[in-house]
Amino acid sequence: MSAYHENLIIFLTVSPLFFFIIAVSFRLLDNSALLFLQKDILVTSANVSVTSIKNQINKTDDKEFKEKLRLALLYRRLHRTCLILMLLSIPLMFTGYFML
């Protein structure tokens, strides 16, 4: 086997784990519940819904708070994207495993 082929197989078998670690990192960066609590907005869960974040972005006049909420929304979207990429790369992992 060529070095390129071996590296491709390694990438295919490790890619779901890589995407999962990146997704967890983005989830940890999302601090939307803390942002709400700092502004004395009561939340019942640490997982604030996207609609609640969008509503607060539209309602608030504080530019700093608005930017922090937009950043939290971006982290939430990146988290979801990495999870989707992880799920899509699982069949590739099995393909790489059977190519060994």
Image (tube, rainbow, N blue to C red):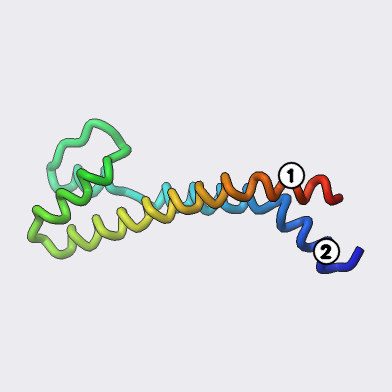
Residue 5's disc is: 2
Q: Amino acid at mark 1?
A: Phe
Question: Helix, strand, or loop for circle 1?
Answer: helix
- Which residue is the extreme one toward the top? 44
- How many discs mark residues in the rendered view? 2
| Number of other residues with Cα within 10 Å of mark 1, as a class: few under 14, some 14 to 19, many 20 or more | few
Whole-percent x and y of residue 85?
A: 54, 52
Q: Can I make out residue 81 in this image?
A: yes
Whole-percent x and y of residue 31?
A: 32, 48
| Residue under the image location 58 percent in, 48 percent down | 88
For the residue pair 60 and 2, the one nearer the viewer reads as 2
| Number of other residues with Cα within 10 Å of mark 2, as a class: few under 14, some 14 to 19, many 20 or more | few
| Residue under the image location 37 percent in, 55 percent down | 75
In the shown orientation, is residue 39 left or right of residue 46? Answer: left
Give the mark, 1 or 2, whose residue is nearer the N terminus. Answer: 2
Whole-percent x and y of residue 95?
A: 75, 48
In the shown orientation, is residue 8 left or right of residue 42? Answer: right
In the shown orientation, is residue 100 left or right of residue 84? Answer: right
Residue corresponding to mark 1? 94
Q: CA distance from mark 1 to mark 2?
A: 15 Å
Q: Can I make out residue 17 in this image?
A: no
- Which residue is the extreme one toward the right? 1
Q: Amino acid at mark 2?
A: His
| Residue under the image location 14 percent in, 64 percent down | 63
In the shown orientation, is residue 30 left or right of residue 50? Answer: right
For the residue pair 32 and 58, the one nearer the viewer reads as 58
Question: Helix, strand, or loop for circle 2?
Answer: helix
Give the position of the N terminus as an image quadrant: bottom right
Q: Is residue 63 above or below residue 51?
A: below
| Residue under the image location 56 percent in, 47 percent down | 20
